Image (cartoon, helix red, strand yellow):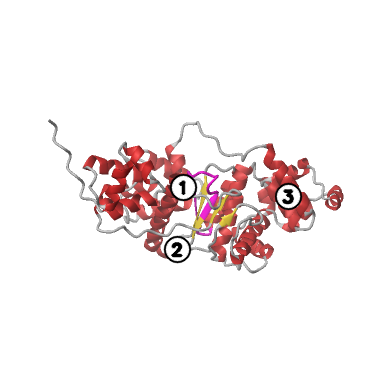
């Protein structure tokens, strides 16, 4: 008769915390482990313990080191961000394990960057502009754009919206702000920000289309610049019972993002005589909106919103067009199905700034090659490939 596997001397409170932190219910964990629900609930109350193989499976399921379960109390972790952007009517939904893991990953990358920043000293300064969410969003966006050093002529010359996303990311990282692009459902979050004096960070969903991703990036940039943390609603007007300061902050961040991507004077100068007629009638043909969107490498939604902000269309027309567009097609999300390139995935997730910081720290002997590979999330020759790709950007 085979001997029974020894029990794992785990801490019940830590086991319950690990499950809750990834957003799984007791029944979900039990189903994955193929044991009764009552047994998992009992382990979390101290009524019995899992075997060592079962504890190893739980560690893999909760994405935690097995050693964590043996700690006397739950470890302290950063508070999840409250300022994340969502699609309409999704901001009250519980986050999935995938989204929770993405937040955890972003926080880990930010911690790594913070440690590197202290090691590298003033070699990597942060030049994040300071704005007030109670101030003029148009003026704040104009000043921020000067800091980014991107002219409208340069912007209009970019090949497409994907190139624009990459160029805007490069400009933002040039100010010392980290921009991560991670795997989480865009239906739950389009992006979130992590404030820090040494390593402020923005995280975007890789499943979002390039134009909305650029908008989310500058929305979160506004949150960092305003030093304001609040739940971000993708809708142009808050539809929930959010406190007034939260609504004001969201209005400001949306206004800021639109004004930076589509400066008022540049938009007005692009408008032809026929546009004046359209403005009076509030009837903007889709093709004209697409033309303007192509110039600024944004979505037609952003163009129409800018026209509304500038008094060139009405709220009624704006809302009607958005309802019309919503019925045309679902959100255009990034498609899967192609072979992933580990080096490109690593760079895409972490950004050129963090990769550059890692290489600089490695060259100074502050971290080992094993550390470098671990922080980049790749192995072997892929490390050199990530560094080579990043060098083309910086």
Q: Quadrant of residue 332?
A: top right
Query: What residue is disc 3 on?
Result: 319
Which of these two is toward me, 134 or 327?
Answer: 327
Residue 25, horizontal then vertical, whole percent:
39, 46
- The 10 Å Cα crowd at callout 3, few under 14, some 14 to 19, many 20 or more, is some
The mark found on residue 309 in the picture is none
> From which residue to which does the magenta span run?
175-192
The mark found on residue 198 in the picture is 2
* Separation (CA) of disc 2 from disc 3: 41 Å
- Give the SS element for disc 2: loop
- The 10 Å Cα crowd at callout 1, few under 14, some 14 to 19, many 20 or more, is many
Which of these two is toward me, 86 or 343?
Answer: 86
- Circle nearer the N terminus (2, 3): 2
- Circle nearer the N terminus (3, 1): 1
- Give the SS element for disc 3: helix
Query: What residue is disc 1 on?
Result: 99
Q: Is residue 382 above or below residue 308?
A: above
């Amino acid at each position: 008769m085979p001997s029974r596997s020894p029990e794992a001397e785990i801490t019940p409170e830590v086991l319950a915390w690990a499950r809750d932190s990834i957003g799984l219910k007791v029944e979900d964990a039990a189903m994955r482990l193929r044991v009764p629900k009552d047994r998992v609930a009992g382990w979390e109350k101290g009524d019995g313990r899992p075997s060592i193989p079962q504890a190893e499976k739980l560690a893999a399921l909760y994405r935690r080191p097995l050693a964590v379960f043996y700690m006397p109390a739950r470890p302290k972790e950063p508070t999840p961000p409250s300022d994340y952007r969502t699609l309409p009517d999704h901001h009250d939904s519980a986050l999935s394990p995938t989204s929770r893991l993405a937040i955890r990953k972003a926080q880990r990358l930010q911690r790594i960057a913070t440690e590197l920043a202290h090691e590298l000293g003033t070699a990597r300064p942060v030049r994040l502009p300071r704005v007030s969410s109670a101030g003029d969003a148009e003026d704040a966006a104009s000043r921020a754009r000067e800091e980014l050093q991107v002219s409208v002529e340069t912007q209009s010359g970019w090949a497409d919206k994907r190139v624009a996303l990459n160029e805007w990311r490069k400009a933002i990282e040039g100010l010392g702000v980290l921009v991560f692009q991670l795997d989480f459902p865009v239906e739950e979050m389009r992006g979130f920000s992590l404030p820090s004096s040494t390593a402020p960070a923005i995280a975007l969903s890789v499943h979002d289309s390039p134009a909305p991703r650029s908008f989310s990036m500058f929305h979160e940039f506004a949150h960092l610049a305003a030093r304001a943390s609040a739940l971000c609603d993708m809708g142009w007007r808050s539809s929930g019972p959010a406190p007034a300061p939260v609504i004001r902050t969201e209005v400001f961040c949306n206004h800021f993002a639109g004004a930076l991507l589509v400066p008022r004077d540049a938009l007005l100068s692009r408008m032809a005589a026929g546009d004046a007629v359209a403005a009076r009638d509030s009837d903007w043909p889709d093709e004209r909106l697409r033309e303007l969107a192509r110039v600024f490498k944004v979505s037609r939604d952003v163009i129409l919103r800018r026209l509304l902000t500038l008094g060139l269309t009405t709220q009624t027309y704006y809302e009607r067009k958005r309802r019309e567009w919503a019925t045309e097609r679902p959100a255009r999300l990034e498609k899967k199905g192609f072979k992933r390139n580990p080096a490109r995935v690593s760079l895409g997730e972490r950004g050129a700034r963090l990769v550059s910081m890692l290489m600089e720290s490695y060259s100074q002997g502050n971290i080992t090659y094993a550390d470098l590979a671990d922080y980049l999330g790749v192995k072997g020759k892929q490390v050199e490939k990530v560094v080579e790709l990043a060098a083309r950007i910086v």
